[in-house]
Amino acid sequence: MAQPPQASALESIQFTATAAAPNAITGLFSRKEGPVKVANLLDVDRRGFDTIGGLVRKYGPGPFFVRVAAANSILVTDPQDIAFVLDGSPSKFASNPGKKQAGMVVFQPDALTLSRSPEWEGRRSFAEHVLATGKPLHPLAARFLDVAYDEADQLAALGTITWEAINASFQRLTRRVVLGEAAAGDKQLTQILQSLMAEANGTPGKVGEQYPELLHCIGRYTSAPEAGSLVALIADAPGKIYGPVEGQVIHWLFAMGDTLPANLLRTLALLATHPVKLTLAREEIGAADLHDPQAVAKLDYLAGCIYEAMRLWPTTPMLARVALEDIEFPGGATVPAGTEIVIHNIFNHRNGDRIDYANRFAPDEWSKGEAGKDRALNFFSHGPQGCPGAGLSIFLGQAVLARLLHNHGLEDQNSGLTPEQPLPYAQNYFTTSVGLTPA
Ligand code: HEM
């Protein structure tokens, strides 16, 4: 039984300023373009990385306390401790500590990710059925492939892929995949969700005024589900969901409409600046039968490229938990119930003491290497509460990118990335644009 070491007050201020606050300032739930630009100019992600590196050298590798604003939190960076926390979520470690709950409650008070037992178990089995979690292919993959190719062709017609373009395209793709073709043009639904998510950044701790309106808009499609959409699978889904079914659909809408395209634009920027890797990806795509959803799902090198964008610039920069009971970590450190726990993805994903490819674009580490088994890489999280939409996300990403790269080359316009230099700790997707050239 040993109390973990405690970072000093000064170190805690440094940690909060460089590694925790920037996440809140740039938007916890809806990223804000202006603050992201300033954070990039000030290189705050590198500063956060350096701060944590110094703390880990001094107090690690086991868990240690660091004060984040008012809460004295535990930082875990050792893969064994990270696995211990994520494998024990949500039974021992709940995924709704203060700020996350106070923000997310605005736009999804019944969210799976905020749930504890017994709601979590019911909602989780429901989500796993609809999203086909862990299955090699989603049962609706053939239709989703058609939607993805159609959206990729519309994007390609623009000639240049900007954040605005890929976000609009994925918002439409998302409405088509989740709610059906009838929802393709329903921008109003997306706007209501976006405005609620912007409100969540202020962590007000109460349900947003527009929330009932959002449920009503989603209800138009769940009440008469269209064949071939995710909501058509709800009728056969097991699991008691404790509340309106529409409340579960919200997470699918923002994760597919916002998070996924941010990662794909970054993948395109990486490929556009790494010609050898672009050639390898295009060779793999050229050899596959792109009419066959199974063949698309087996584009392992292309999947590795997407995983790398997520590893290098995790869209969930940190995972937060709160201990529901007194905890003894595998190394013997003990913390009392109620302790908040932070897993800092930006640090863990770039930890050069463990990962020799930390700062370069290394898709092979996924397609041929051991990256998939590394418990420190948690852009999709891991364990019982790992992202249930991971497989579907990667499939949709493979489909859109395969279609684009089958028919086009890429031209970097402004990313500033290069294989000759370590990749930067931050990448501003708001200002990224990638040109498409004739194949
Ligand atoms: C590239 C896209 C995505 C990324 C990077 C991502 C990442 C994550 C991460 C890191 C978590 C764990 C969060 C935490 O524990 O604090 C998570 C949870 C979750 N994700 Fe995703 N996600 C993506 C796409 C999706 C999609 C498309 C869906 C649904 C269609 C989805 C549904 C969910 C749900 C429902 C949870 C909560 C799971 C639970 O608490 O049991 N995600 N995701």
Image (cartoon, rainbow, N blue to C red):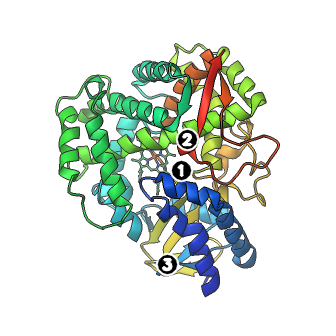
- Going by the numbered disc 3, the residue's amino acid type is Ala
User: Number of marks in the image?
Assistant: 3
Q: Residue at x 60, y 86 (%)?
A: 9
Q: Secondary structure at mark 2?
A: helix
Badge 1 marks a residue whose secondary structure is loop
**Quadrant of the snapshot with the C terminus:** top right
Return the residue at label 1: 315
Instruction: Give the residue type at disc 1.
Output: Thr
Q: Please say if 321 is above or below 397.
A: below
Find out if the beta carbon at label 1 lies less than 8 Å from the nearest ligand 1 atom. yes
CA distance for labels 2 and 1: 7 Å
> Horizontal and vertical percent for residue 356?
80, 51
Along the viewing direction, whichever of 375 and 347 lies nearer the viewer = 347
Which quarter of the picture shows residue 52? bottom right
Residue that numbered label 2 is attached to: 263
Q: Quadrant of the rendered structure where residue 146 is? A: top left
At horizontal 24% and vertical 44% (from top left) the residue drawn is 246
Q: Which of the numbered marks, if any, corresponds to residue 410?
A: none
Return the residue at label 3: 69
Q: Amino acid at mark 2?
A: Asn
